[in-house]
Image (cartoon, rainbow, N blue to C red):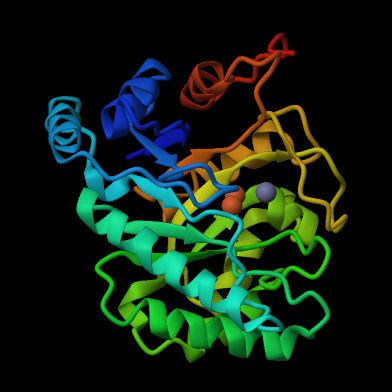
Amino acid sequence: MLIIGSHVSFNKKDGLLGSLEESLSYGANTFMFYTGAPQNTIRFPIDEEITNKAIEKMKENNINLDNIIVHAPYIVNLANNNEEDKYNFSINFLKQELDRCKKIGIKYMVLHPGSHVGLGVDVAIKNIINGLNIILEDSSTMILLETMAGKGTEVGRNFEELKKILDGVENKEKIGVCLDTCHLNDAGYDLSNFNNVLEKFNNIIGIDKIKCIHINDSKNILGSHKDRHENIGYGTIGFDNLLSVIYNEKLDNIPKILETPYIDDIPPYKEEIEMIKNKKFKDNLK
Ligand code: FE
Ligand code: FE
Ligand code: ZN
């Protein structure tokens, strides 16, 4: 079954119910959200009543809570421990995020592995593993490490780096991977032959570790290490290549999440989801 949705907002007033209603308006059957602004630490308490109402409404709409994804904020960085207090802040903040996930019943939280900022990849990987082992000690939510574009000093820009991190994590049931098509392209994985990319992934990590896929086109060419998302079919990956990911039979039932840019301040997700469902590109979106 195709599980498709987009990034949606999550605000204090409407909580999970607001996120659900937004995604229903897009014709989605899943969604992803930040539990607060990704660039700051202000977090409001999870409202149990609203959450329960949302879960009730999900059932009515055949939406499985297990497919709903939280994205960790991007102010945290587990890769660099140059400043001890910043590193500890990242660990503690992610622990709090996982608590919030638990309160809602979220199964998966996507996390960027981090940037080494000059420390080098090997030290960074040790830092990430150490942090994850503390964070995942008593977590009921699984952390999905996202495949990165390799912008700046980002770690996780290839399957080998992700594999090293996964190998060091003790709680294996609580660690997985989130593919991002824009990041894969920018990292140098050619999605015009996605089966080949998937085979590589399977040989190094194992397909069973993929629990979420971010579906984005890219503004930049293969291997550019840039990370700028483009609307579906308007970028260098192209509509058909994205469909080959979305409809790959080995990735059936895995939540696919759009993180494409707004067009003239308007979310494009209803139209993009429609194109994906119809398997037909519309060139008048922008
Ligand atoms: Fe991300
Ligand atoms: Fe992403
Ligand atoms: Zn990105």
Against 160, is 262 above or below? Answer: above
Q: Position of residue 36 (x, y in %)?
A: 45, 43
Against 195, is 255 above or below? Answer: above
Judge from the rendering whether residue 131 lies leftward or rightward of residue 199; answer left or right: left
Residue that appears at 29% across and 61% down: 99
Quadrant housing residue 85: bottom right
Q: Nearer the viewer, residue 168 or 87?
A: 87
Quadrant housing residue 215: top right
Q: Position of residue 162 (x, y in %)?
A: 60, 77
Against 278, is 15 above or below? Answer: below
The C terminus: image quadrant = top right
Judge from the rendering whether residue 62 lies leftward or rightward of residue 243; answer left or right: left
Q: Position of residue 3 (x, y in %)?
A: 37, 39
Q: Nearer the viewer, residue 228 or 249?
A: 228
Q: Position of residue 95 (x, y in %)?
A: 38, 68
The N terminus: image quadrant = top left
Residue that appears at 39% across and 37% down: 31
Judge from the rendering whether residue 256 lies leftward or rightward of residue 75; answer left or right: left
Q: Nearer the viewer, residue 198 or 166?
A: 166
Report the number of discs. Answer: 0
Residue that appears at 64% across and 20% down: 281
Q: Nearer the viewer, residue 60 or 116?
A: 116
Residue that appears at 49% across and 56% down: 72
